[in-house]
Amino acid sequence: MKKLLISTGGGDCPGLNAVIRGVVKAAKKSKQWEVWGSKEALNGIMSDPPELIKLTPKKTAGIHVKGGTILKTTNRGNPLEYPVLQDDGTWKYVNICGDVVKKIKDLGFDALVNIGGDGSQKISMALNKLGLPVVGVPKTIDNDLLGTDLTFGFSTAVQIATDSFDKLVTTAESHHRVMIMEVMGRDAGWIALHTAVAGGAEICLLPEIPFDLKKIRKRIQKRYTKGRGFVNIVVAEGAKPVGGEAIGQTSGDVGDRHFKLGGVANYLKFKLEEAGCKQQIRTTVLGHVQRGGTPVAFDRILATAMGVKAFELIDQGGHGRMVSLRNNEIDSVPLEEAVGGNKFVGKDHYLVHVARSLGISFGD
Ligand code: F6P
């Protein structure tokens, strides 16, 4: 019997459990592999004793419906920059990929399925280069990974954001208010764009299209003078003003990166009021609600299909690749294609055009 290890790394994402179950079921069918999970990404492998879970069809039955990951996850302990506390109390960051590969092999594993975002796939690439057969599975609610048309978790996040948006529309309408809803999307505005079109926003602000406050004010004013006495705005956390930096993020650790909670939504409110906007403005920061709960059917299906494909690649020796969705087919790409950048919303993307046709302003 060969042994396969699964790891889930980075932020959680609806559909992770469906991938795990897909791998386990496909492996069971092959009768050649047993599957284990490393707890909290690859930290489970490196802890002493290792924290591993044997993943059987019984253990994973029905988990595709559940959000999060039964293996737990973390964005700490990246083996490419592993934090080591020095005698003087400062931290040094070292590459421990060689140790990780040795430990995985010493524990009798033949291959790894690494489910995660850009950072995790960089780790996949490094481990694979060191002689461990690795297949990556792309994960992020932001849908900004290169090499795949879609990532699981994205549709769930858009659904949650749209449901919230719909609720904010009725309260905005009742109070004649301006509602600003901040969604995730540190680097790319896919969630914001899709939510704005699905919900019918008046204004949508993305990291890719810097906004001009004057244009936003004008659009708000137009809505009020035309008799529609309320405005709903969707803003991605990474949105920035023309010529400026991103204002802040929905989330982050203190000291980890510069941030202000609910930064951009509150910045907008402040700036609009400062500029004399007479309407009442309220902000809502959705935050991690977008990553929680049960995955929508589409994400369960996509994640399951990606899990099955990941196992097939491992079984057929197709390692060094990341599973992907391309032109409606489950496919795979070399790991190199998936790392080193983001898939941004292009100014000419068809949905940007659709949004503009609907009268949605990007503040540009
Ligand atoms: O990368 C996905 C993402 O959801 C970003 O949109 C967001 O900025 C980030 O995760 C939040 O991460 P954390 O849970 O570590 O605060």
Image: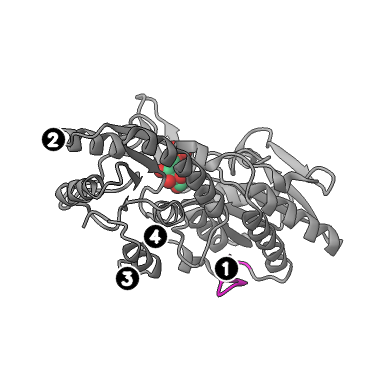
Q: Considering only order in the chain, which callout, 1 or 3, is on the residue closer to the N terminus?
A: 1
- Kindly report which numbered mark, 2 or 3, lies closer to the viewer in this rendering: 2
Circle 1 SS class: strand
Q: Is-magenta flag for residue 222?
A: no
Residue designated by label 2: 276
Please state the horizontal and vertical placement of residue 205, each as a whole percent of the image.
30, 51
Q: How far is the residue under mark 4 from the one under mark 3?
A: 17 Å
Who comes first in sequence, dot 2 or dot 3? 2
Q: Which tag is nearer the camera, tag 4 or tag 1?
A: 1
Residue at x 40%, y 65% (from the top left corner): 351
Q: Which of the pair 237/103 is nearer the observer?
A: 237
Q: Decide: few, some or many residues near mark 4? Use Cα within 10 Å; few <14, some 14-19, many ≥20.
A: some
Q: Distance between the residues labelled 2 and 1?
A: 47 Å
Kind of element beneath mark 2: loop
Q: What residue would you read off at disc 3?
A: 348
Magenta-drawn segment:
319-332
**Disc 2 to disc 3: CB gap under 8 Å:** no
User: Which mark is first along the chain, 1 or 4?
Assistant: 1
Please indicate whether residue 217 sits to the left or right of residue 188 in the image: left
Q: Which residue is drawn at 58% across and 48% down?
A: 100
Q: Inspect this view and state whether residue 139 appears.
A: no
| Label placed on residue 342 | 4
Q: Where is residue 175 in the image (x, y as percent from the top left)?
A: 35, 32
**Mark 2 CB near ligand 1 (8 Å cut):** no
Is 219 situated above or below 180?
below
Foreground of the two, 23 or 187:
187
Give the residue type at disc 3: Asp
Using the image, tell me which numbered label, if any, was put on residue 167. Answer: none
Q: In this view, does 6 lie to the left or right of 204?
A: right
Q: Amino acid under label 1? A: Leu
- The secondary structure making up most of the magenta span is strand
The quarter in which the C terminus is drawn is: bottom left
